[in-house]
């Protein structure tokens, strides 16, 4: 059984910050935990716009606070994100994530992240 508390992660090696200051990802579950996916409690900071393209990963995201939007760059569709919104990037969707206020998102990745990843110039994480 794995039990972790967010307060024990904040400020430690599982508390990963975007070099551009757009987000903070508290990594609750990682590849080495052996569960087949990773889980993150992520803050997208207010007023930011982040290019994301998980070409090597699938991601499921559930919003538990804040307001923002996701723009699908292939279609131009814009979807509002508020508390209670879920979105799944099942087609490796290249998108822009905008935070109108601080967004708090619970994210899962398959394959799981190892822990220190940050987005590359194209918005992706490196392959596993």
Image: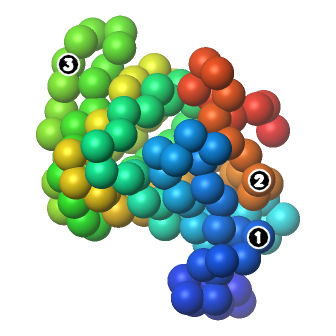
Closer to us: mark 3 or mark 1? 1
Q: Quadrant of the C terminus?
A: top right
Which quadrant of the structure image shows residue 39? bottom right
Alpha carbon separation for disc pair 3 and 1: 36 Å
According to the picture, the residue beneath numbered tag 1 turns out to be: 13
According to the picture, the residue beneath numbered tag 2 turns out to be: 116
The percent position of residue 16, horizontal first and vertical second, equals 65, 59
The percent position of residue 59, horizontal first and vertical second, equals 51, 43
> Reading the chain from its start, which is encountered first: label 3 or label 2?
3
Query: Is the residue under label 2 in contact with that under label 1 (CB below 8 Å)?
Result: yes
Secondary structure beneath label 2 = loop
Which quadrant of the structure image shows residue 33? bottom right
> Reading the chain from its start, which is encountered first: label 3 or label 1?
1
According to the picture, the residue beneath numbered tag 3 turns out to be: 77
Alpha carbon separation for disc pair 1 and 2: 8 Å
Q: Residue at x 52, y 47 (%)?
A: 21
Q: Is residue 36 visible?
A: no
In-image side of 111 versus 31 (left or right): left
Closer to us: mark 3 or mark 2? 2
Alpha carbon separation for disc pair 3 and 2: 31 Å
Comparing 56 with 116, the one in front is 116
Secondary structure beneath label 1 = loop
Q: Residue at x 35, y 14 (%)?
A: 73
Q: Quadrant of the N terminus?
A: bottom right
The percent position of residue 2, horizontal first and vertical second, equals 69, 86
> Reading the chain from its start, which is encountered first: label 1 or label 2?
1
Comparing 49 with 27, the one in front is 49
Query: Is the residue under label 2 in contact with that under label 3 (CB below 8 Å)?
Result: no
Comparing 62 with 41, the one in front is 41
Q: Residue at x 43, y 33 (%)?
A: 50
Q: Which mark is residue 101?
A: none
């Amino acid at each position: 059984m794995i039990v972790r508390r967010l307060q024990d992660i904040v400020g430690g090696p599982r508390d990963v910050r975007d070099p551009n200051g757009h987000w903070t990802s508290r990594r609750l579950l990682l590849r080495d935990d052996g569960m087949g996916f990773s889980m993150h409690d992520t803050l997208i900071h207010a007023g930011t716009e982040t290019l994301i393209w998980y070409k090597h990963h699938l991601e499921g995201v559930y919003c538990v606070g804040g307001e923002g939007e996701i723009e699908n760059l292939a279609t131009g569709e814009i979807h509002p994100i508020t508390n209670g919104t879920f979105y799944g990037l099942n087609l490796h969707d290249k998108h822009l994530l905008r935070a109108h206020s601080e967004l708090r998102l619970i994210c899962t990745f398959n394959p799981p992240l190892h822990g220190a990843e940050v987005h590359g110039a194209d918005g992706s994480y490196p392959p596993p």
